[in-house]
Amino acid sequence: MTLSVLAVDDSRTMRDMIKIALTQAGFTSTLAEDGEHGLEVLDDMTPPDVIITDINMPKLDGFGFIDAVRAQEKHRGIPILVLTTESADTLKARARKAGATGWIVKPFDPAKLVRALKMVAG
Amino acid sequence: MTSPDPMAEIKASFFIECEELLESLQDGLEALSNGETDSETINVVFRAVHSIKGGAGAFGLDQLVEFAHTYETVLDSIRSGDLAVDPNIMRVLFQAGDILSDLVRLSRDGEVIEPSLTQDTYKALQDIVGETSDGDSGADDDIDFQPMGLALDLDFADDAKSVFTVMFKPSSELFESGNEPLHLLKALSELGEATVACDTKELPVVDELDFETGYLQWTIRLETEADKSAIEEVFEFVDGLCQLTITEGEDLPATDLPEIEEDETPEPQAVTPVAAVATSAQQATAPAPGQPTAAPRATVRVDLERVDRLVNLVGELVINQAMLSQSISAIGVQPSSEVSSGLEEFMRLTRDIQDSVMMIRAQPIKSLFQRMSRIVREASADVGKTVRFVTEGEGTEIDKTVIERLSDPLTHMIRNAVDHGLEKGDARRANGKPEEGIVKLSAAHRSGRVVIEISDDGAGINRPRVHQIAVEKGLIAPDTQLTDTEIDNLLFAPGFSTASEISNLSGRGVGMDVVRSAIQALGGRISISSTPGAGTSFTISLPLTLAVLDGMVVHVAGEAMVVPLNSIAETLALTTKELEQLGSNKFLVRIRDQFVPLLDLGVELGYRAPLDRYEGAVVLLISQEDGSRAALVVDSIQDQRQVVIKGLEESYGRVPGVAAATILGDGQIALILDPTDIITNASGRVSSDDTLFDLAG
């Protein structure tokens, strides 16, 4: 199964790691470096199968990004996984309210990320 | 392109990113301390630390993670408004930034991190947020950083199969969150053998169907080697978005579902799965294969080695072009001809290419300035002075190597400025100055060079004291009359130290003479100026790059050589009047009432025996701005030009008196001399390391 994934993270290291994990799983990845950039990229691309997003990012944070994605009719159904170092339940609840599909705490286990992606995107 | 270990590559990239993050952290902290407490500034600081923590966690750099976490906690309280920034907190934040930068460096170099490095600051941070430092406050974090999925992997080792019954009823919110029941069922079935039963009794007629409402519920019988936690993991993301029961055993009839009355109005039931399948199928068929990876900003990271190779090749191109010009003019082509004008254009382009390539190596000097900011903080704390550090021209670009090699000399000078330059607070008050001293560091491009200035608003150089010390140290005779500039320049004399006792701050066995040699080794010059009561200022002028050099081509014993232009004060032809003989084969040249030792380059480099007489000889007066001077005898001067530096050290090791080599326009190889080294080597023999000979007075 090949999935197309949009990953939004302001840390280059994280983007690199996500990309490697995805590539090794045979997925295609598109990367963006903050929420605003993520929205631009999303706008330009064939809608991805899954979106991965960080929470703490400049310009537009993860919550704002998820809100904005969910506000678009055509992106309403795309699963969004939050990948962050945050683990507070209040933040998880906020992300879920915004429309996040799942939450993975960094540092992430690549295998777990791939399992989660397959799980949410089929 | 692909390295055998992608993780090593990412790790290297992580540390580069850390440098950038530490830089924005510094910027942010500076802004914060200047009262810019808007949320974006605080966010920048927070995110920098946060990202370092995140990356460090991925590489198992636990000490870095732990420290960053505590730091982040403090920043988070500031961000949320629970904590107001005051000078004391600011100080701890700066300190923590410094420690964080140390931790990053040590982690990068794979060095051992002593707990003593972090413990004070760690405690200070914890005190701020009111955590008790029982040394185990990181216990909480361990949970955050537990790599997930570990348990699942272990479970697979367990062979025993067991049967679970899972009852799952998604709520409408589950669909809004982008989750998809079918995928969950599929994931569940991958754990073992699953028998799924679906209850469709709530399904409405098609007209009343709402795609995002959960109408269905499933009961799954799962025979698996995995344990309950693996099943829970499948439903982890939908926790709270569905009714879920997982029971071990198979007590429930697959079709007869337990009654669940819940929040949802008994919606008419639906084809949700159908809709979902359609969406998934649509997405699956359009997977955007060659989807380009969105480029993060318009920069590329290139291995420095590759840049250097390019720089080298362009250097060759410049040489080649010069050779071509020379041979074309040799065959007598008219300057007005097309060949000549084409060649001229070629020359211009080559220069442009060279400049552009050099700029690739150039970096803003900012990182260096930020390091100095830390030095000021540490030094001022050590000597108990209040110091404001002002920087200007941080964006000035200069060769990366120059930046690296400036670090030590600048550190020393900045420490000096804080330690010796500025007066103590009470002395400043007595002189009507604000108690807070100012140390200023600025950089600017000026006529093809970079000029860096380090100044303080302290007491200025105490010239009578400097004079006295120079006499005590035997550097000058007691009755020597010197101008203010000459006295100031005594600071650069080897072995000179103004501090009556070496303070542990700027002492460290390094004097301004070492600073000066370091600057000179970079092809730079340093000068000093001071106004009593108003302060001292050092000006360093540096070439933009280390790859080319302005030099004077001279001939000695039939060999062409290049002498760096920045070391030549003047050139002159000797007359009898200027020459004084000292013993059998030692000569001095009298230049404006000072004697300068005469060194024959041919002799110094071992090409020939000393000449009998030097009248009429051409000499280069080498001056290092401080008095260490010598007159170098050459046979003739050819011209001045820019030459491309070719290092020799890799092939030949360090050759005394020779800095490097170059290839001249005619293809001839010429050595680039190191005049300072030649003079130092000679002075051992000539026994005149002090060239400030006192003459008539």
Image (cartoon, coloured by chain):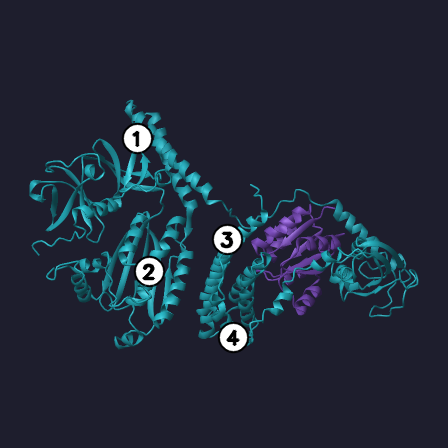
Q: How far apart are marks 2 and 3 (CA)?
A: 26 Å
Gap in angstroms between the C-alphas marked 1 and 3 = 42 Å
Q: Can residue B170 be seen in this view?
A: yes
The tag on residue B16 is: 3
Residue at x 44% of width, y 66% of height:
B30
Marks 1/4: CA distance? Answer: 68 Å
Instruction: Pick whichever, B287 or B517, lies toward us.
Output: B517
Find the distance from the CA under tag 2 to the CA under tag 1. 41 Å
C-beta proximity under 8 Å, tags 1 and 3? no
Label annotation for residue A45: none
Residue position marked by numbered label 1 in the rendering: B668
Give the chain letter at badge 3.
B
Q: What element carries label 1?
A: loop
Q: Earlier in the sequence, mark 3 or mark 4?
A: 3
Disc 4 residue type? Ile
> Disc 4 designates what residue?
B128
Q: What element carries label 3?
A: helix
Q: Which chain is cyan?
A: B
Q: Identify the mark nearer the N-term, 1 or 4.
A: 4
Q: Nearer the viewer, residue B674 or A2?
A: B674
Residue B372: percent from left, percent from top: 38, 61
Question: Mark 2: which amino acid?
Answer: His
User: Within 10 angstroms of label 1, few (less than 14), some, or many (20 or more) residues?
Assistant: few
Specify the chain shown as purple.
A
Residue B412, numbered label: 2
Rendered location of residue B601, percent (x, y)? 20, 39
Q: Give the amino acid at mark 3.
A: Ile
Disc 3 packing (10 Å; few <14; some 14–19; many ≥20): some
- The residue at 27%/58% (across/down) is B512
The mark nearer the N terminus, 2 or 1, is 2
